[in-house]
Amino acid sequence: MARRSVYGAPAEVRAVRQQFERWRTTRQPGKRIPQPLWDLALRLADVHGLNRVARWLRLNATKLRDHVPRHSDPPPTFVEGTVPAGFLLGAPAAEYALELGPPATDTLRIRVRGATVAEIAALADALRPGPRPR
């Protein structure tokens, strides 16, 4: 098998490649790559990109992608909008603050000026992940 060059690869990539090469020379046929090596490759992929790291480490990019953890955060179930006291619904507001996201996580905050309540509701609906209610 032809060796692929890691010329120009950062030092941390070369160090991880050495660990993969050491494992390849000492492994028993049919043994799977240990999870700690996959974890090292995934950390590099976060910085340098999945396909480039797969090429540098002589890994199958699809199998590396299969080891990327899946995030299963639920879509936000609550969207709160505040209306100033005495404000007429449907008239443009001076400013709205729209917050989208589940509690205790990163929340998307948007400030909108000169929009109606209906426009803000449409914006919130368009930004909400998942299927749209009918």
Image (cartoon, rainbow, N blue to C red):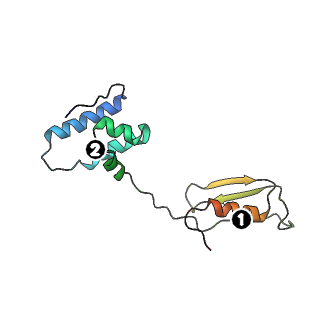
Q: Nearer the viewer, residue 119 or 15?
A: 119
Tell me if residue 110 comes above or below residue 82 in the rendering: above
Contact? badges 1 and 2 (CB < 8 Å): no
Residue 62 relative to residue 20: left or right = right
Amino acid at dot 2: Leu
Amino acid at dot 1: Ala
The Cα atoms of the two marked residues, 1 and 2, are separated by 47 Å
Residue 98 relative to residue 61: left or right = right
Residue 104 relative to residue 79: left or right = left
Q: Quadrant of the C terminus?
A: bottom right
Q: Position of residue 36 (x, y in %)?
A: 28, 46
Q: Residue, x 30% and y 30% (percent of image)?
A: 14
Q: Position of residue 75 (x, y in %)?
A: 55, 64
Q: How many marks?
A: 2
Q: In the picture, residue 116 is in which quadrant?
A: bottom right
The disc label shown at residue 121, or none: 1
Identify the residue under disc 2: 37
